Amino acid sequence: MRKTIKVNNITCVQCAKTIESHFSKLNIEAKVLVTSKKVIFNYNEKDLTLDDITDNLLKIGYYPTIDNEQQIKAKRKDFIDLMIAIVFSLPLLYTMFNHLGMSFIPVPDLFMNAFFQWALASIVLFIPGRRFFIQTFNQIKYKNLGMDALVVIGTVSAYIYSIVETFRTMNMHHNTLYFETTAVIILMVLIGNFFENRVKEKTSDALQQLVSLGAKEAKVKVNGTFISKKIDDVKVDDVVLVLANEKIPVDGIVVKGKTYVDEAMITGESMPASKEVGSKVIGSTMNIYETIEVKVTEDASNSVLAKIIETVENTALIKPKAQRIADKIASIFVPAVVGISLIVFVIYLLTNHSLTESFSPAIAVLVISCPCALGLATPTSISVASGMAFKQGIMYKGGEFFEIANKINAIAFDKTGTLTKGKPELIDFIGDKETLQLTASIEAHSNHPIADAIKFAYDGTLLEVTDFEVLVGLGLKGKINQDAIYVGSKKLANELKVEIPYDGEKYLNEGKTVFYTIKNNEVINMITIADEIKDGVKELIQTLKSRGIKPFMITGDEEKTARYIAQLVGIDDVYASVLPQEKAQIVETIQNEGYVCAFVGDGINDAPALKMADVGIAVSNGSDIAINSSDVTLMHQDLSLVLDAIDLSLATLKNIYVNFFWAFIYNICMIPLAALGFLNPSLAGIGMGFSSIMVVLNALSLKLFKFKTTKES
C-alpha cells in the first residue's frame, strides 16, 4: 500500500535521511518530499498499520499530521514557538547595542543582568529550541548530521560558555556573555524556517491543487438507499449516485442514466464527453447534465487522479547527478564545519586573543554554515517545474530526463496515434451510395478501427448479416439476403479473381488504405480510409530540424504509406513495416550512430522502444503499458508539448545549477568572513536562514518561464 503523510517539522535533506534511514531498518520504504514536507510510504497492510508508521515518526521526533485539522494545529504550534522566541529574545537583542559599543543607546540595567539573560535564554533554548535538540539526537543516531546539529552546537556552546563566565567572574553586568547569541540564533533560524515554509508551500501548489480535486465523500448504494461515505471507505463494485453539476467521486462504469462529463482536467478536451450505460468515467471529473449511477472499478488509492498525484510526487524525488554529488558533500559538511570552527578557535587563542574574542568567530562559523541550501537545490526546482508542467499537460515521471534533455539530438516518432490522430476516417467513397449500406452492415460485425470509421460515416439502418467470417489479412465476408458480400483489400479481390473497375493506386500513393465491396463476384464500390495527421506536426518537425534535432519515423505501416506521411510532415529518415520488437532495436541502432535519442509513441507495441530510448515520451491517449514505460507523458494531443517538455526541463536544469552556485558561493564566502571575525554569531543566524530562502525563491523564479509552442486547447 502507498500512503503519503504530511510531516510538519521536516526542514532539510538531513531530516529526510534520518526518516529514510529509520524506516529502512524496519524494511519499510520511505521517500521524503522535503519541499512539500511529506513522506511517501510503501508497505504491506498485513504487516503494518498507519498507527505503527505514525508511532515510529514520533519516536524519532517528527510529527505526522494525518488530516487538515492536525495540519492547522501543527502550524499553530510552530507559530506559538516563534512568538515565544520573539518575546523572550527581544530584550536580549536589545542588549546587543551595548555589546556592540553603542553606548548612546540606553539599555536598562535589568537587561544586562547575567541571571536575567540566563533565564530568558533558557526559555528560548529549551522551549522553541527543543526541536533542534530532538532532531540532532536522531541525526547523530543515524549519522546524518545537518543544520540542526550546527544550531545546537553553536547555541549550546554559547549558553554553557556564558554560564561558566557568570560564575567565574560573579560580575552581574559585563559584556562578555553570549546569552543573547543563544536566543537570537534560535529566533533567526525559526524566522528563516517560517518564511521558508511559506515559500515552499508555493513550490508545491500544483500538487496541493491536484489533491484538492479529489472528492471527499460519495453517495453509496446500501440496501436500496444511498448513504454518504468517506471516499476511503468506498470499495470496488459499490454503486454510487452522482447528481448533475456534481463531481464524480470515483473511477467506474455508468450503470444507469445518460449525461455529459467535463473531463478537461484529465484529457485536456474542452468539449464535454457523452456518457451512457457502459461508459467509463474518471473520478474528480464533473457531471454536468443528468443524474447517473456509477459502479466503482478502482478504489481511491488506485484511481486515475491518485496515479497522477503519485507521478507528480515521485518527480520531486528525482536526483540528477549534480544533486547526488551535493548530497555526498552535505554528508561530510557538518563534521568539516565543526572542524573549521575548532581550528578558528585554536588559531585565535594562539594569536594572543582572549577566550571571548576567540569564541565569537568560532560560533559564527558554526551558525553561518548552511548545508540545507545544497539539499534544497534540486527538489525545490523540480517541484516547481513539475507543477507548471502538469498544468501545461506534461507529466515528468523520473529517470534522467532533466540531465539528458539538453543532449537530445534525435527524436523517433511512432506514426499511428502519435503523428496521426490514431482514428481512421472515411475519406473517399466511389460507387453507388446505396451500396454503402451493404458495406456498413458487414463492418458492423467487426471491432477493427477501420470498421469503426465506416460505421461512423454511415448513419442509416443496417441489414441482417449471416455466415459472418473474418478473412485474416484479407477482409470480411458475410451473406445479406442470400447474396455473398465481401469487404477487403485489392489482395482479396485478386484472391476472388474479380475485376476492379476503379483506380485505387493513386490513393495508395497518398498513404490511404483502399477497400472494395464485392457482391456476387462483382466490385460495387471503393472506399478509402486515412488516418489524418495531427495539427501542428509539420511545424514541430521543422522546429526540431532548426534546433539540430534529427526526426525519425518508426512504424509498422507499409513502406509506401509511411513514406507518403513522412514526406508530408518533413521527416526524411523512415523505418517502415517494423515489427513491435524491432522498434527497440532500431532505436538502439540510432543510438549506436552517436545520437541521444528520444522516442515518442502511444501503443503497447511502443513500450520496448520507450524503454530503450534515452528518453521515452508517451502520448496520453496511449495504453497504460506505453505510459508506464515512459519518462514523460503528454496529457494532451498537441505534439508541440514535446518541445515544451524539453524547454522546461532545460530551464529547470539551469535553475538547479544556479541554486548550487548560490549554495556553494554562500558557504565559500561566508565561512571565511565569519572566521575572520566580520560576522558576529547573531548576524550569522540571519545569514543561515537567508541562504535557504534564496534557494527556494530562485526555484520559484521558474514560474516566469513562458511556454513558447503550445496552443490553447
Image (cartoon, grey):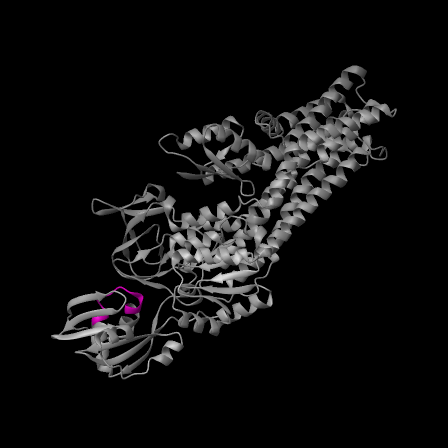
Pick out the residue farthest to the right. Answer: 352
Q: 642 or 240: which is nearer to us? A: 642
Residue at 68%, 26% (x, y): give it: 153
Find residue 139 and report its image quarter. top right
The answer to whether residue 445 is magenta is yes
Q: Please tell me which residue is depicted at 20% across the width and 47% down the height of the picture.
A: 224
Highlighted magenta segment, given as a residue range? 442-451
Q: For this view, does 643 lie left or right of residue 558?
A: right
Q: Is residue 315 above or below residue 171?
A: below
Q: Could you say which quadrant of the image residue 407 lies in? A: bottom right
Q: Judge whether residue 316 can be spotted in this image.
A: yes
Q: Quadrant of the N terminus?
A: top left
User: Is residue 375 in view?
Assistant: no
**Depicted 473 relative to depicted 109: above or below:** below
Q: Is residue 277 left or right of residue 321?
A: left
- Which residue: 74% across, 40% down? 668
Q: Is residue 684 magenta?
A: no
**x and y, in percent, of residue 378 in the image:** 60, 45
